[in-house]
Amino acid sequence: MDAISVGILSIIPPVIAIVLALVTKEVISSLMVGILSGTFIYAFSTGGGVVKAIDVTFALMAEKLGANASIILFLGFLGALVAVITMAGGSKAYGEWASQKIKSKRGAQLGTSVLGILIFIDDYFNCLTIGTVMRPVADRFKISRAKLAYIIDATAAPICIIAPISSWAASVMSQMSGLDVNGVPLNGMETFMATIPFNLYAILTLIMVVILCCTDVEFGPMAKFEEEARNGNAETVVIQGEDDELSKMKISPKGRVYDLLIPIVTLIIFAILAMLYVGGYFNGGMTLAEGFGNTDAGPALAMAGFGALIVAFLLFVPRKVVSFKDFMEGIGIGVKSMVGAFIILTLAWTISGVCRDLLNTGDYVGSLVKASNMAPALIPAIIFIVAGACFCDGNFMGNIWRTYSYCCNDL
């Protein structure tokens, strides 16, 4: 499939996807319609019809999915790890231990945010684990479910997007490929590391979480939820996903705190070692920084996730914390819990391909910007303002604007 120039029609796919998401508050269908609009434009502009448009859609989707299969594998291993840790009772044991050690509401809030910073591998892993672990602690100190959800969510995504060893980092690095404005090949890891000091949204959000945890300042609707929680109604807001399959699993009474800590620490260590291995560091002749800079994060994280799952198996099954059958069942449940992430990422990669590989959106937008004599320094600010206005869904806006901005990397 060769890219074509269709002028202003090239911006229709992302515009349709964003507008539909704002109107419907539904991410998957919005992305899918945006993709189809682009492939229909491509098909009819190249002399094809409906059948060709459908063929191009799924050919491009398969191509993008294949190119990023290692990230999908990592997310699958991660979901499985969350499930088996929960099933083994590690999360429950940590929650019970934390409830004994934490003595105040402020300590409970800070403990939640600190744990969120420590579990930086993946935001799904972060939310699922910390939500399960800290909910009993939050209820004990009359912290509303809305406040708990805010602390968890406002810690999970920001820490994952500035941690180089995370599923978000792997996804971003997969988009940071190709050539820069000078025609020099981009290295995903090096480019990602260079963006961290400029990710002010993530950094300031983490600072805001710490301030609110330490000062107990409440305003807006949160003040109402906290007041109701102080009056004994902590479940004013139910955490999303509380009734999913993970929460319904049979939890072993034999779990210990280290059943949570060992797999997580192992995952982090394996991820670091795997990144260095894939980057060629162990072959000699390069520094640590060069090893990380030369790595491919997707395969490395997939290796780390598989290794951590093996460690969890050796930790749980021989001790009979969970049976072999239950462990295997937990893997299936965990992978299913990541299906939403699989779909959104696949669609985000595909709409990026529509703009970049089929319609030359970057060339068109670049020509408009050059003709307007706009200062390049304003472009990140404009994207930030528009993304802030499009508050319908964080994952959607993160993927849409990230992939769309990379389509325009000639700027």
Image (cartoon, grey):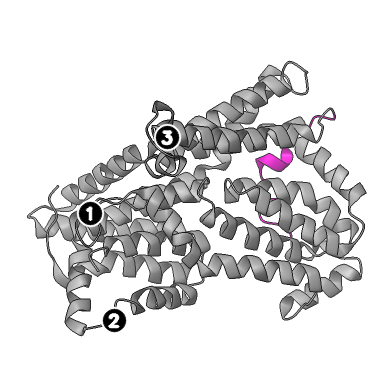
Residue receiving disc 2: 375
Depth check, mark 3 against mark 2: the one in front is: 2
Q: What whole-number distance in Å separates the C-alpha atoms at marks 3 and 1?
A: 24 Å
**Is 252 in the magenta?**
yes
Q: What whole-number distance in Å separates the C-alpha atoms at marks 2 and 1?
A: 22 Å
Viewer-nearest residue: 178 or 156:
178
Residue 273: give x, y in percent of width and height.
52, 33
Q: Element at badge 1?
A: loop
Q: Is residue 142 visible?
A: no
Q: Element at badge 3?
A: helix
Depth check, mark 3 against mark 1: the one in front is: 1
Residue receiving disc 1: 184
Depth check, mark 2 against mark 1: the one in front is: 1
Give the amino acid type for the residue marked by disc 1 in the picture: Val
From the viewer's perspective, tell me whether residue 75 is left or right of residue 361: right
Is the residue marked by circle 2 packed among few (<14), some (14-19), or many (20+) residues within 10 Å? few
Q: Is residue 124 above or below residue 284?
A: below
Q: Which mark is residue 18?
A: none
Magenta region, residue range: 238-253
First reached walking from the N terminus: tag 2 or tag 1: 1
Instruction: Identify which residue is drawn at 24% across, 54% down.
Output: 179
Residue 28: give x, y in percent of width and height.
44, 55
Residue 53: give x, y in percent of width and height.
20, 51
Viewer-nearest residue: 125 or 200:
200
Instruction: Identify which residue is drawn at 53% across, 46% down.
Output: 166
Give the amino acid type for the residue marked by disc 2 in the picture: Ala
